[in-house]
Amino acid sequence: MIYRKIQITVFLLCAVLFSCGISNEQAKQGLVKFLQENHQGKYQIKTFKKQVKEISLEPDMFWVELELKENSNVIISFQWDANRKALYLPKGKHEVASIDSIARKKLSRERMVSDLKKSLGSNALNISIDRSYINLRLDREPEIDFIDSLSIQIKNVLEQYPQEWNTEARVNISTSKNETGFLQLIVKPKHYDDSNLKEQFKPNAVLVNAFGSEKATDVTQKIFKTLEKRTRSRQMLKMWINQQNLNDLYVAVEVEKQNPRAPKNLPTSYGVYLAKWNAKDFKVDKLRFFNYASISKRGIVQFLEGRLPEAYQIRTYTN
């Protein structure tokens, strides 16, 4: 009996909530009219629905996806206030000043992707752009010569879009066997100026995804096994790859020990091991320890990079 009453109460509550505000049909008609008057039918409504979680607080707010008729790959997501006849960015109260400017930006990105596909050809299985990141799926693990060629091709495409692409590109490289991606390539178009930055990546620098990629996880496990006789409390800090030979790495591992003075006896980091890892032979060639008692933990990455061979240095620092 009690369960039945609860069901009825929930049903009535939902009915009341859904009855509040402008109906879906009225709201959609209002949006169609708005788009026709302000954008001359350039956009087609792909999705239009009331978000359940917003019903009680904002009964006139609807979730909208617009498709650019010129290019169906360009999808723009908004919230439509049917009462105020206004569009807002998703999950926010910022009113959209110009749908067309957002569409132009997305259309440029689509054209960039198309140009990249033409330039890279069959070597690229998939390409997508997310902000300043280019996600690239290759048909095989790249060698350094291919990386150099890849950088030139991507750079040439980006330089055709100086207004739309005004930063360095971080190219995430993955393969069918390593879907998360182990390598990230820095590409700097000539119109990008980073001379005012204190830290600058070198052109065509190759970075390592030390967290999350399958290959990095494999290296981490083997490095930890090498260190297990020295310490069992450790965590990965950083990886650097040889810019001339992608088989060699330097790996920084921070080590910890129990601190009786810390809250709840939490472990405290006391130093870092810097290991040279030979990926071809799966072994540690060199191992060096830096104690935080004699060096500062702050800025440790810059400190370690300064002690790497030139072939591993990916940044320049300006004091």
Image (cartoon, grey):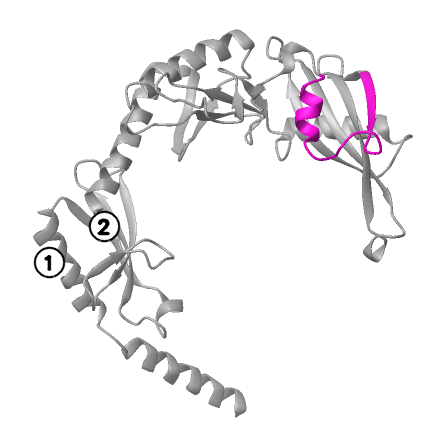
- The stretch in magenta equals 286-307
Drawn side of residue 94 relative to residue 215, left or right: left
Q: Is residue 197 left or right of residue 310?
A: left
Q: Is residue 242 left or right of residue 157?
A: right
Number of numbered discs present? Answer: 2
Task: Find numbered disc 1 in the image and state the secondary structure of the residue it sits on.
Answer: helix
Work out whether residue 121 can be spotted.
no
What amino acid is found at the position of numbered circle 2 in the picture?
Answer: Ala
Q: Residue at x 14, y 53 (%)?
A: 35
Q: Nearer the viewer, residue 255 or 301?
A: 301
Q: Which is nearer the N-term, disc 2 or disc 1? A: 1
Q: Position of residue 132 (x, y in %)?
A: 42, 31
Question: Would you say residue 294 sits in the magenta stretch?
Answer: yes
Residue 280: name its quadrant.
top right
Question: Mark 2 or mark 1: which is in front?
Answer: 2
Residue of label 2: 97
Toward the viewer: 21 or 303? Answer: 303
Instruction: Classify 173 as above or below 22.
Output: above
The residue wearing badge 1 is: 33
Tag 2's secondary structure?
A: loop
Residue 122 image point, x, y percent: 39, 15
The answer to which quarter of the image holds residue 281 is: top right
Q: Residue at x 32, y 82 (%)?
A: 16
**Is residue 198 magenta-colored?**
no
Q: Quadrant of the C terminus?
A: top right
Q: What is the CA distance from the residue labelled 2 to the residue labelled 1?
A: 18 Å
Could you tell me the amino acid type at mark 1? Answer: Lys
